[in-house]
């Protein structure tokens, strides 16, 4: 039986279920919850991913912040990439290095133009707060359908790069690990990214055993998502606790 991991009284609880398969499942933290309980009837595996701390869209002249829209777990808000051109960039700042991120696309507002993403990581930050970016290696775009990127939900992954931590003045005063992408061609007129879910830096997930209820306090300053894996199929019960 689980025991509380925080001393303050419980204010609210929220439950959901995650369907585990042999393909990793990516799940954002529920916003404003401080504790989580997991239960699965069979063995499963789990990783904890960094927090996506900043999302900035650059349209060639100005930067617009879409951080809350990327991580609030609601389809009512989104990161708009409407008609994104090759000169535009989406910047993603994480609290620790990631090997990629899972994108939940809107079911209707998605890209239909044949294009790829030019994905880069920050390899250096100058004393003046200017970032230098380099291409990631061995990238794989799980959002592609029919040659069009950002067309379906999927994981964009790559070899973990030698990304550096730094404060890029144009983006944020907080030192973060920065990644960015631009399309190879102008994208469709209406594109909505509902969620951007950080991926772990490794797939060497922790081993979680069957029939045990696991209870964790969430490190909201540093972490923002879970990754789950299974050798077959199973249902994971997830209970979020707010204090």
Image (cartoon, rainbow, N blue to C red):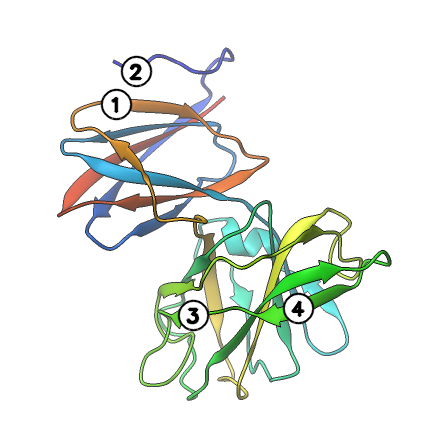
Q: Nearer the viewer, mark 2 or mark 4?
A: 4
In this picture, is 231 found above or below 87? above
Task: From the image, tell me which residue sits under label 2.
Answer: 2
Mark 2 lies on a secondary structure that is: loop
Mark nearer the N terminus (2 vs 4): 2
- For disc 4, the neighbor class at 10 Å (few under 14, some 14 to 19, many from 20) is some
Reading the chain from its start, which is encountered first: label 4 or label 3?
4
Query: Which residue bears the numbered disc 1?
Result: 213
Dots 3, 2 in contact, CB < 8 A = no
SS at mark 4 in the image: strand
Closer to the camera, 48 or 29? 48
Instruction: Measure the C-alpha gap from mark 1 to mark 3.
Output: 37 Å
Question: Sequence-wise, which precedes: disc 1 or disc 4?
Answer: 4
Is disc 3 placed on a helix, strand or loop?
Answer: loop
Q: Estimate the spatial distance between the alpha carbons at disc 1 and disc 4, rounded to whole Å.
A: 43 Å
Q: CA distance from mark 3 to mark 2?
A: 41 Å
In the rendered image, residue 74, in percent from the top left (x then y), is placed at: 44, 52
Task: State the SS at label 1.
Answer: loop
Q: Residue at x 44, y 44 (%)?
A: 225
| Distance CA(mark 4)–CA(mark 3) | 16 Å
Q: Are marks 1 and 3 in contact (CB under 8 Å)?
A: no
Give the quarter of the figure containing the N terminus: top left
Residue found 18% across the figure and 40% down from its top: 235
Q: Quick check: marks 2 and 1 in contact, CB under 8 Å?
A: yes
Q: Earlier in the sequence, mark 2 or mark 1?
A: 2
Disc ID at residue 133: 4
**Where residue 239 sits: x, y (%)?**
33, 30
Residue linked to disc 3: 138
């Amino acid at each position: 039986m689980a025991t509380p991991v925080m001393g303050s009284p419980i204010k609210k609880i929220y439950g959901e279920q995650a369907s585990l398969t042999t393909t990793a499942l990516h799940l954002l933290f529920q916003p404003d919850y401080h504790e989580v309980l997991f239960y699965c009837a069979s063995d499963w595996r789990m990783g904890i991913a960094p927090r996506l701390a900043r999302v900035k869209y650059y349209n060639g002249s100005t930067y617009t912040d879409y951080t809350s829209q990327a991580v609030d777990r609601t389809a009512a808000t989104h990161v708009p990439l409407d008609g994104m051109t090759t000169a535009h960039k989406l910047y993603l700042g994480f609290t620790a290095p990631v090997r990629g991120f899972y994108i939940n696309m809107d079911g209707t507002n998605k890209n239909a133009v044949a294009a790829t993403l030019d994905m880069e990581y920050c390899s250096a930050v100058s004393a003046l707060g200017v970032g230098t970016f380099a291409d990631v290696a061995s990238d794989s775009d799980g959002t592609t359908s029919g040659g069009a990127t950002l067309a379906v939900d999927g994981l964009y992954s790559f070899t973990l790069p030698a990304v550096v931590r730094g404060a890029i003045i144009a983006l944020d005063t907080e030192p973060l690990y920065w990644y960015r992408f631009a399309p190879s061609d102008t994208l469709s007129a209406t594109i909505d990214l509902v969620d951007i879910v950080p991926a772990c830096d490794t797939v060497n997930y922790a081993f979680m055993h069957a029939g045990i209820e696991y209870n964790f306090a969430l490190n909201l300053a540093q972490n923002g998502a879970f990754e789950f894996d299974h050798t077959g199929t199973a249902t994971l019960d997830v209970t979020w606790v707010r204090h």
